């Protein structure tokens, strides 16, 4: 399994600011996935970055991956109150490797 | 294209009872994984089903069992419920020959009294 550990545990910002969350993992991976979870709900798949990619964009999301440091970051630009949620990362491989999650980063965006 | 669906949404049981949760995977997916998420924690892997067999299992007792049907849908059964089984149970679907991308359902909130 490829454990994801998110940092910081909690982050509070004003609407319009950028939010950056970090993730570290321990073993080799083929890809890293980021998920969002609104309170008490299911996980929403945000983005997958492959191990041969260094950066990927999707709308207001920017993800970087540094395989030499076994770390990734998720940047949310121009945050909105609706971005308030917990964010999780998990390393993946081809096939059906189980995902191993950390405790996530709880993001609060204040209007 | 329907995403992953789960039923029921909420469930309340008492200690010692048994419960069955259900999951239908995303269209085109053939693998179902189940996760348990306690309050304030990240999801923990329970087990995974592919071709109607349990393929991988996390660190959960055999009170937790499952099944996958020919249409790829799946059930999670928990026997002899304990208070500590209270959690959000998440189902995720994926494609065995894919890159490992998993899509989650909305979850079933189980409360054990």
Image (cartoon, coloured by chain):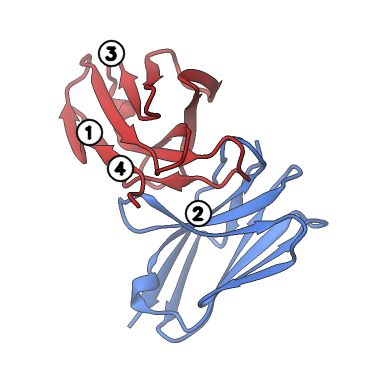
CA gap between label 4 and label 2 equals 23 Å
The crowd level at tag 2 (other Cα within 10 Å; few <14, some 14-19, many 20+) is many
Q: Regarding mark 1 in the picture, which secondary structure is present there?
A: strand
Q: Which label sits on residue B111?
A: 1
Q: Which label sits on residue A104?
A: 2
Q: Regarding mark 2 in the picture, which secondary structure is present there?
A: loop
Decide which of tag 4 and tag 1 comes sooner along the chain.
Answer: 4
Which residue lies under the disc numbered 4? Answer: B5
Could you tell me which chain the residue with mark 1 belongs to? Answer: B
Which residue lies under the disc numbered 3? Answer: B80
At 31% across and 51% down in the image, what residue appears?
A41
Chain A shade in the render: blue
At 32% across and 19% down in the image, what residue appears?
B78
At 74% across and 63% down in the image, what residue appears?
A53
Could you tell me which chain the residue with mark 3 belongs to? Answer: B
Camera-nearest residue between B23 and B26? B26
Camera-nearest residue between B70 and B92? B70
């Amino acid at each position: 399994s490829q454990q994801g550990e998110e940092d910081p545990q909690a982050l509070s910002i004003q609407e319009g600011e950028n939010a950056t969350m970090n993730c570290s993992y321990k073993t080799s991976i083929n890809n890293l996935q980021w998920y969002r979870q609104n309170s008490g709900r299911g996980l929403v798949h945000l983005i997958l970055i492959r191990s041969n990619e260094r950066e990927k964009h999707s709308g207001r999301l920017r993800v970087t991956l540094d395989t030499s440091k076994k770390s990734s970051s998720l940047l949310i630009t121009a945050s909105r109150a609706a971005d308030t949620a917990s964010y999780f990362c998990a390393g993946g491989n081809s096939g059906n490797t189980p995902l191993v999650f950390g405790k996530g980063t709880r993001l609060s965006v204040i209007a | 294209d329907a995403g992953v669906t789960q039923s029921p949404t909420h469930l309340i049981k008492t200690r010692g009872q048994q419960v069955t949760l259900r999951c239908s995977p995303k269209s085109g997916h053939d693998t179902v994984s189940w996760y348990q998420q306690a309050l304030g924690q990240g999801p923990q892997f329970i087990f995974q089903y592919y071709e109607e067999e349990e393929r991988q299992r996390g660190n959960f007792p055999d009170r937790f069992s499952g099944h996958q049907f020919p249409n790829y849908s799946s059930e999670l059964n928990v026997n002899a419920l304990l208070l500590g089984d209270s959690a959000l149970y998440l189902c995720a679907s994926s494609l065995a020959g894919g890159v490992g991308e998993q899509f989650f359902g909305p979850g079933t909130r189980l409360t054990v009294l």
